[in-house]
Amino acid sequence: MGRTRRTLRDQFDAIEREWTPFRRSLRRHHQPAFDRLFDRARSHADAAGQQNAPDRWRAFVFCVLLAQERAIAEREETIAQQRQALDALGERVDALEAESPGDRPE
Amino acid sequence: MAFTIDVREDGTPVRWALDADGGATPTADPDYQPTIYAAARDDRDRPLAWLADALADDPKVVAVERVRKHRSLRAEGPSPMLAIRLDRLDEVRQVAREIRQREQEAFLPGTFSLYDVDLDPGFRYVADRGFDPTPERELAVLDLALPEPAVADGDVGPLRIDGDPAVGDGSAGADAASPAAAVADAVETELDSRDPDVLLLSSGEIVPLLAAAGVDLGRRPGFSRLAGESTYVSYGQVGHSPARYDVPGRALIDRSNSFLYGHSNLAGLLYFVERAGKPLQELATDSIGGVLTAIEIRAARRWDGHHVADEEREDGVPAPWQKRQTEDWKSLETLHTADRGGFTFQPEAAVHEDVHELDFASLYPNIIRNYGVSPDTVCCDCCDSAAVPELEYSLCENRDAFLARVLGPLLDDRSDAKARLREAGSGEDTTDDEAVVEAIKWVLVSCFGYQGYRHAKFGRIETHEAINAVAREIMLTAKRRLEDAGWRIVHGIVDSVWVTAASDREQRPVREVADEITDEVEIRLEYEGCFDWVAFCPRKRASGAALMRYFGRWADETVDVPDSTAADPAAAVDFDDRYKLRGIEARQRSTCEFVADAQRDLLATVHRERASEAVCDRLERHLRELRAGAVDPADLAITQRVTKTAEAYEQSTRAKAALERAAAVGVPRSPGQSVEYVVVDDDCSGPERVRLAFESDDAWPAGRRYDATFYADRLVRACESLIAPLGWEEGRIRSHLQRDRDVALSAFGE
């Protein structure tokens, strides 16, 4: 077959193997974060493969950044929704208080 | 006109023409002179003159003439060549090797390019003489099969003729001197009464074995051995090719050595006999790449420099031998861009619901045909089109696109046969059309990979790169169109894409979108069907989803559930029609029947319950059966292709044990062959660890006992594949089982 170059997915796997000493030295409760980094990178390996950057580290860092950007956006949206819900709740509390100012619990 | 060709010992070809009312008539052709061609580097005259001189007194050479032929599909015009006419058909390679040796006396290596050297003799003969090897009447076939242990023992006793024993167990052969003589009589009787044109053999070794018993399988006495057995490596896989034999006047097909017969049938082979113009016996032993090459050799002889002409031409392209064409110079950047495969999305390892699958029909062959990507057109010197995306290679507009001309008829014939299959009524026999569809599919599969194979006669790596680049572009176009129409991409692999409705959007009908994509990319995007759900498996021992391991259940409308079975639709649909499996155990050749069946059963449970606990409970039922010793050992046989000899295995693996066992019981196996074994004690090493499937009871541990623990482990892993997409890994399955075992320990019979 013609293709001899490794796919980007395989190159990410190779980075993960090369960095095993790093992972081994991490405190156990820090290791999941290390693993998540590679999960994040792999989740965009398809697009990075099409970009075909000559430097696999650049591709890796960009993939992680993008995945984190998505995670931030999702979190911001959740926060915004929760803030809205909280505001609505606050308004209801205020309204209830305004309706019965005399019934405040001791 | 010449359905099979024999080569007599004096090198004379004998062609056999089929008689209209059965039988065949031989005609010897002593005047036939095979020809090879030689060209010199840079078309220099001096080397050719020297070579003509050097060959003048070679008794194997009849004549040397000057001719003009195209050196390759890309040649600007014809080059001067020597046509070296030889006396004997069986001396072609010898002469070619001698030319290579003589070359060293006077010139640099590679000064001469040689052509038309390594053609199969029958193919060369019919091509040179213009005979059509397509049979003009139905062929009479005799099917002879001998089980492998009998072949190893040299015992023809268990021979079967058309599936039935040649000699009954009882008195049928009583009057004969020995069982072998009785079998010989039975075979002679069949040969006399039916006069078969084709011998379909389970192994070529039947020829010498029957000869030893006094049977001539040919239409004339005698047989010959064309090649000894050998081991080879192809696509990174070790293969084994058995010895090949030839008998006069009949075409031999060795089932164990015919890829196309194994994946198709006689109709599939005959289709390519006609397309490639290659006699049946030689075509049957060809690899799929070999079949394609035969068609290309025929077409190249008709090449006029720009087009494939209707007739063979004096100046066409002969088949290069030991092709020395190097890869074009390219920058590191281009190499980096070009050296890639198709586009594959990263799926999410999970269960996805209501997923539609869409496939591009024969993507690579159609790219070749519709975009004109071919060795003669890619990176031409005359056009400045930068037509190939990313790579900016040109695609010549002044040439035919040779490969497209070669594949066109195959693509058309395949879609015609598929159309006939669609229209066929339920009672019609469609076996032949199905076989042709399959046979063509396999040859089409080879057309793309073969472009990157450096020994391919008409291949070229830049064609391979260009096809991939176009394929990636097409996949991205499809993605954009589908997303524009409100669909979310679940997964996509090179030519298949899975989509589901994006939850926050309106969708346009998926078939309508597929039609639009078809129009834009000019290759049909077929709607394959809808899955109730499809699960993509996580990788084992690494994070993320595997790309090619998935399973799904087709929806009712896709499998076309008949109304009459509405009460119990699940029972009416065949498992294979209902589920699609890829890469998991039940699809793997090395999985035993018991584990495969259990996995299919668990899959049905996955669908019903969609909960890992329920699947694990069901798993226990299979484990109980296994541990009780109630499984038929035949269902536990593991088929494995071995890649080395027993001695070459450094670890004591099961394959090594099976090889040692095979040698011990007298059926030794070569690398590339398969061995079928049952594990009886996985803690042992050496031949006691396994039993071969065919060994009799007394060779087994009492009661044909097997190693239940070993198979239980396989079963648990097969279960894990199914529920891993639901988030359960092996450890969790085992602890679930353990918990239940604590509750009902006795259930396991331990």
Image (cartoon, grey):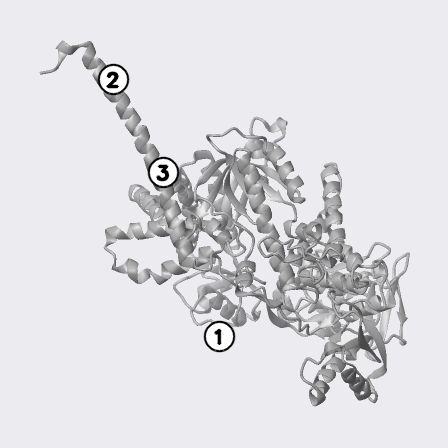
Q: In this view, does B690 lie to the left or right of B143?
A: left
Above or below: residue B707 compared with residue B244: above
The kind of secondary structure element at disc 1 is helix
Q: Nearer the viewer, residue A93 or B271?
A: A93
Dot 3 lies on which element?
helix
Residue A104: horizontal and vertical position, in percent? 13, 14
Q: Is residue B238 visible?
A: yes
Residue A92 marker:
2
* 10 Å crowding of disc 2: few (<14), some (14-19), many (20+): few
- Tag 3: residue type? Ala
Front disc: 3 or 1: 3
Residue at coordinates 35% horizontally, 41% vertically from top-left?
A71
Are discs 2 and 3 both within one chain?
Answer: yes
> How many angstroms separate mark 2 from mark 1 (CA)?
82 Å
Please state which of residues B198 and B118 is positioned toward the viewer in this rendering.
B118
> Chain under label 2?
A
Circle 1 residue: B647
* Image side of residue B42 versus residue B3, left or right: left
Q: Nearer the viewer, residue B123 or B723?
A: B123
Mark 2 vs mark 1: same chain?
no
Q: How far apart are marks 2 and 3 (CA)?
A: 29 Å
What is the total number of numbered labels drawn onto the structure image?
Answer: 3
Whether residues under marks 3 and 1 lie with C-beta atoms below 8 angstroms apart, the answer is no
Question: Which residue, given by chain and number where applicable, does mark 3 sit on?
Answer: A73
